[in-house]
Amino acid sequence: MANNLASLDSAFHALADPTRRAVISRLITGPASVSELAQPFAIGLPTFLKHLKVLEDSGLVGSGKTGRVRVCHLQPARLAAAESWIAEQRAIWEGRADRLAAYVENHIHKEQGQ
Amino acid sequence: MANNLASLDSAFHALADPTRRAVISRLITGPASVSELAQPFAIGLPTFLKHLKVLEDSGLVGSGKTGRVRVCHLQPARLAAAESWIAEQRAIWEGRADRLAAYVENHIHKEQGQ
DNA sequence: GCAATAGTTCGCCATATGGCAAACAATCTC
DNA sequence: GAGATTGTTTGCCATATGGCGAACTATTGC
């Protein structure tokens, strides 16, 4: 579940950049306009808009325009999907690690009486 | 915590590719050699090695060579770091959403008696 | 030692990415 | 409606990415 390959690609790709992660962190505190979002960064607006496009294409961020100002907001579902993929992997890993640990412990008890 | 910017960059970048995610999924079941890992994919070995290099550079995967065979294994710490970043964001988001929900509910109770 | 096996390195290519400046809308505000 | 504000589009550039084939370097096994 939540393994839409293409969307995982674009979600992780969107997260693989500090500027874009910072935008997400900012949007978590609430919606914001483009220039408001761009303000902390030392890059030009056109460049920043590319980052924003990556975020929107990934579905992590949505936006709507009212008048001349575009307001962006977080779309946490995709964030959850990305987290879920990792969580699933880790769950399998930990299941395996637990079984391994249980086996080793059992082994030690039986063979070494420790 | 776990916000080493550069390593998050490379970890998410490594995850932003279906081949590399598949390698991780495979390695969760246990270590494997390079050709074993490459076998399911319809790409050449040199290309596959580039993916492997991305995974190793990100710290998600480690490897060691014995004889002529390189054995790769998962390094779950970095996977956990990536997951943590998202989890932290979501925690903040949910905290905010909870407060918002509480506020709205309170508001409705007080103003509309519903 | 010769041949097969397992990886690695080297060029080469097309496309994507992330940056810029400059020009171009569109919409407020006075 | 003139001017400021807010985004957007358009070229341009350097570098990174993901793919290939070909050549090369170990090892292993007979």
Image: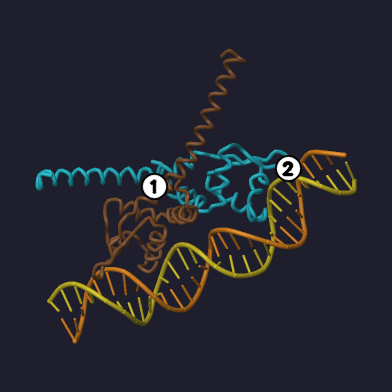
Chain colours: A cyan, B brown, C orange, D yellow
CA neighbours of label 2 inside 10 A, class few (<14), some (14 to 19), many (20+):
few
Residue A69: x, y in percent? 70, 42
Q: Is residue B63 above or below residue A84?
A: below
- Tell me the amino acid under the disc marked 2: Arg
* Element on which disc 2 rests: loop
Q: In which image quadrant can residue B99 be found?
A: top right
Assess disc 1: are there few (<14), some (14-19) or many (≥20) residues with their C-alpha within 10 Å of its C-alpha.
some
Q: Amino acid at mark 1?
A: Ala
Chain letter for mark 2:
A
Task: Looking at the picture, tell me which residue is in the foreground, B19 or B6.
Answer: B6
Residue appearing at x 39%, y 63% in the figure? B53
3D distance between C-alphas at marks 1 and 2: 41 Å
B46 to D3, vertically: above or below:
below
Quarter of the image with the C terminus of chain B is: top right
Q: Is residue A101 left or right of residue B56?
A: left
Residue at 43% of width from left, 53% of height from top?
B15
Q: Nearer the viewer, residue B112 or B17?
A: B112
Q: Which residue is mark 2?
A: A68
